[in-house]
Amino acid sequence: MSEEQKNKEITFMPCKIFGIRKGYFDKSKDRINIMNRQLKIYNLLALMLICLTIFSSLSFLFYSLVLFQSWLIAILVSLFMAFVVYNLLKLIFTLNLLPKKAHLFDLLINREQLFEPYYTKKMKEVTDDEILKIVYHEKHKIREMNNLRLRPFVTSSLFISSLIRVSLLVLLGFIVANGLELFIFKNSINNTLLEMKNSEIFKSDYWLIEKVLTSDKKSPFILINSNSFFLDLNILSTGLGYLKIIIDILIISLFLIPIIII
């Protein structure tokens, strides 16, 4: 493969999503290995980003169908939330890609900046001993950067930032999980609602039968035969029990996997 073809690979879609530091590849001796590793990371992240966005879009579509009983509104809400979720996940993933010692890495592969302060000096007039002192001084600075420990307030800031990111992903995963569960178990929920409607216990409850369990003639039920979103969730939680917790954890894990493996 020619050098030009290798450079073209860098413009692959995942790199366009997250951005790529082409300067690192050009200046590093291990250019191809770094490029392949970063492309692999970006490929996996892009795949996860697209999959999670699709799951989220479908989940909000099901939510909207239950809430609004209208395909048009549901599709519009789904597309809007897909845009929001896509950009939110992209932001979170990109923040996690930032290395903790990015400045040191940039310094080591772009060594020109080490010599820039001395370009204006007349090095011919500098003695060998002075040059050795300069070299030793620069090496010492790099060692100090490599061994630099983050200050307490920086550490706490990183912890809070990570906690916010994880909390957002857990919340989003929980919301998406409920939407998908409403669709997956819609038949069981509808059967329970039909039993409630035909039950002697609830027949005297006019509000429940007429307002909640009976659809409008102009807009029939689409997904779940109920006008109460919270009643549907209550039936779902009661019916699934511990299985719902397991499904929630699995879907939340899908949202957390990308930031764990980065």
Image (cartoon, helix red, strand yellow):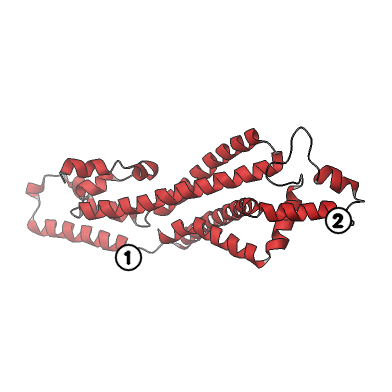
Query: Residue at label 2?
Result: 199
Q: Is residue 102 above or below residue 242?
A: above
Quadrant of the drawing holding the C terminus: bottom left
Q: Which of 163 and 204 is in front in this view?
A: 204
Q: Which of 39 and 124 is in front in this view?
A: 39
Q: Disc 2 on helix, strand or loop?
A: loop
Q: Disc 1 on helix, strand or loop?
A: loop
Q: Residue furthest bottom?
A: 242
Circle 2 residues within 10 Å: few <14, some 14–19, many ≥20 = few
Q: Residue at x 40, y 48 (%)?
A: 46
Depth-wise, is mark 2 or mark 1 nearer the camera? 2
Q: Which of 217 and 69 is in front in this view?
A: 217
Q: Where is residue 7 in the image (x, y as percent from the top left)?
A: 22, 42
Q: Distance between the residues labelled 2 and 1?
A: 72 Å
Q: In this view, does 1 lie above or below 144?
A: above
Q: Is residue 54 left or right of residue 149?
A: right
Q: Which residue is drawn at 88% across and 54% down?
A: 202
Q: In this view, does 148 lie to the left or right of 198?
A: left
Report which quarter residue 173 is drawn in.
bottom right
Whether residue 24 is visible here, answered yes or no, is yes
Q: Residue at x 26, y 51 (%)?
A: 35
Q: Nearer the viewer, residue 67 or 32?
A: 67
The label on residue 147 is: 1
Q: Position of residue 146 (x, y in %)?
A: 30, 62
Earlier-in-chain disc, 2 versus 1: 1
| Residue kind at label 1, given as amino acid type | Asn
| Residue kind at label 2, given as amino acid type | Ser
Q: Position of residue 27 (x, y in %)?
A: 20, 48
The answer to whether mark 2 and mark 1 are in CB contact below 8 A is no
